[in-house]
Image (spheres, coloured by chain):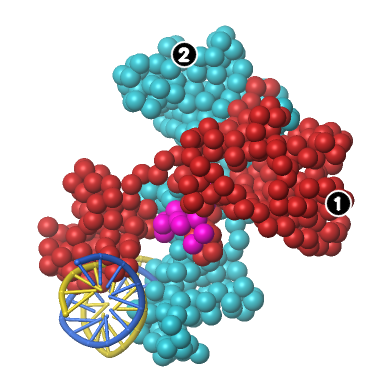
Chain colours: A red, B cyan, C blue, D yellow
DNA sequence: GAGTGGTCTAGACCACTTC
DNA sequence: AAGTGGTCTAGACCACTCT
């Protein structure tokens, strides 16, 4: 079943064989793979070799390993597409902000929890917000859930001068979300910028987002600018790359 | 130096210790970590345990392992930001297309190689291009290099009816790139859409892009639309997530 | 050839989940 | 208690890189 003298590592051959069976439907999504002990007998190799094969599959996101239970074929995640229209004024007028709007459209039950704190701006926040390092910023730390599962983490920073005395320093910003409140205070948002990247999650992110090993996160840094070009908000968003795609559209020229 | 009875796996403790030393500057970027044999003696553990620690660090992208040479602290990659202005008509008029324009701006020596082929549209291409499955498409398979290193892979598909008898069926599309030729043929591009995601690379992509383990790729699917809404091109782009970020800007509303 | 990481064996004990 | 994956040892041989 495997050829130790083929030049290809045995554990890779085993991983390849299992991959084929998963792809071919022999092991359905969600089903349990043979246990390591069974695979040891089946392929007549040591347990270490089997484990290396499993590690490969897990790293590629094909299977989920559950301690004390077994190895399972990972069902393909349902993908949510986030379009830039999520930030339109029309959407704000209709409902309660970007995330809740998306959620409603996708048909799941959303919830968010927010923690507020104030801190001096670090170098990056200062540069992006165009303020001095050490200036006070209002930090809104948000955890977004869909059907109880955490799907997005977002840390929003605003220069405190824009939030003092407003509900932006409270947990509930009301209908339309933070952007609606900024506009009511006279800070009309005229431009957005998003900077998109990807990386492997930190341990904390992996835990919070319940990411299987081998799943990267998408990182989005969004800046919102006022009509006069002053930056109003910097928002660092983290989401599971297997569940989200970002869609941008624009006119040529 | 490590505590086997602390409840934390020894290999994680070793990884943590090395992580601290890397973060603290004790091992500089690019420098060589002690060999596995040396670490075995230093921590008085088996080689397997040391290897697991190395695997962790490599998976998190902190180190690069070179067979027969050693383990090296990975220097932070220089990040290139790709803005959507790379697709403007003005940029096309000035030079030779999106990638080469970026390259010139970033100050490295670019080169691209192209292979052309024709194939029937698969289900996805058919849907996105708005043609029938099986209709012939022109496929332009591009490998983009910067200073010899492969940095981007792109597969562009166009309905063959738009390319027949044009240089789009040849390797060299001339000044301004493919979009300039389409416009000359009367197909004025009015809108772009990009769909951005991230995932772990396939083995082939890992090799081609020389990705260290633990580095995801950004995937961009770009659609270019004609004034009447007809899709002209579907472009699947893959790039190393540690070297690229994508920047989008738009007016509010 | 010496040194490095890559793969593999055979076996042990532990931690977690399920029954 | 039984079965599963998680960690670890002690050792072996191989493949790659450099000198």
- Viewer-side residue, A142 vs B185: A142
Q: CA distance from mark 1 to mark 2?
A: 57 Å
Q: Residue at x 42, y 88 (%)?
A: B4
The magenta span reads: A207-218
The spot of residue A130 in percent (x, y) is 83, 49
Say whether residue A33 is visible. Answer: yes
Q: Is residue D6 left or right of A120 when viewed as pictured?
A: left
Residue density around tag 1, few if under 14, some if 14–19, many if 20 or more, within 10 Å: few
Q: Tell whether position A183 is magenta.
A: no
- As helix, strand or loop, the secondary structure at mark 2 comes to helix
Q: Residue at x 84, y 59 (%)?
A: A136
Q: Which mark is residue B162?
A: 2
On the image, numbered disc 1 is attached to which residue? Answer: A164
- As helix, strand or loop, the secondary structure at mark 1 comes to loop
For residue A126, what is the image quadrant?
bottom right
The spot of residue A145 in percent (x, y) is 53, 49
- Viewer-side residue, A99 vs B225: A99
- Viewer-side residue, B154 vs A118: A118
Q: Residue at x 54, y 14 (%)?
A: B229
Q: Is residue A1 left or right of A182 when viewed as pictured?
A: left
Q: Looking at the image, how many numbered discs can be counted on the residues?
A: 2
Please identify the quadrant where the C terminus of chain A is shown. Answer: top right
Of all chains, the one bearing label 2 is B
The spot of residue A224 in percent (x, y) is 75, 40
From the viewer's perspective, is residue A4 above or below residue B83? below
The chief SS type of the magenta part is loop
Residue density around tag 2, few if under 14, some if 14–19, many if 20 or more, within 10 Å: some
From the viewer's perspective, is residue B18 above or below residue A19? below
């Amino acid at each position: 079943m495997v050829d130790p003298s083929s030049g290809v590592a045995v554990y890779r051959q085993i991983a390849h064989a299992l991959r084929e069976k998963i792809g071919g439907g022999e092991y359905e999504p969600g089903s349990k793979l043979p246990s390591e002990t069974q695979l040891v007998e089946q392929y007549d190799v040591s347990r270490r070799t089997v484990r290396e094969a499993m590690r490969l599959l897990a790293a590629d996101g094909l299977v989920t390993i559950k301690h004390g239970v077994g190895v399972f074929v990972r069902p393909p995640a349902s993908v949510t597409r986030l379009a830039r229209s999520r930030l339109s004024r029309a959407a704000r007028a209709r409902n309660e902000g970007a995330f809740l709007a998306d959620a409603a459209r996708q048909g799941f039950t959303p919830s968010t929890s927010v923690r507020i704190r104030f801190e001096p701006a670090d170098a990056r926040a200062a540069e992006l917000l165009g303020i001095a390092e050490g200036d006070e910023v209002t930090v809104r730390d948000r955890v977004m859930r869909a059907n109880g599962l955490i799907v997005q983490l977002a840390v929003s920073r605003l220069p405190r001068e824009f939030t003092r005395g407003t509900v932006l320093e409270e947990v509930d910003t009301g209908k339309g979300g933070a952007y609606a409140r900024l506009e009511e205070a006279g800070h009309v948002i005229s431009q957005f910028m998003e900077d998109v990247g990807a990386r492997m999650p930190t341990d904390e992110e992996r835990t919070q987002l319940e990411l299987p090993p081998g799943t990267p996160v998408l990182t989005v840094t969004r800046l919102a600018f006022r009509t006069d070009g002053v930056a109003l908000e910097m928002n660092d968003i983290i989401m599971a790359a297997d569940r989200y795609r970002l869609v941008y559209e624009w006119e040529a020229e």
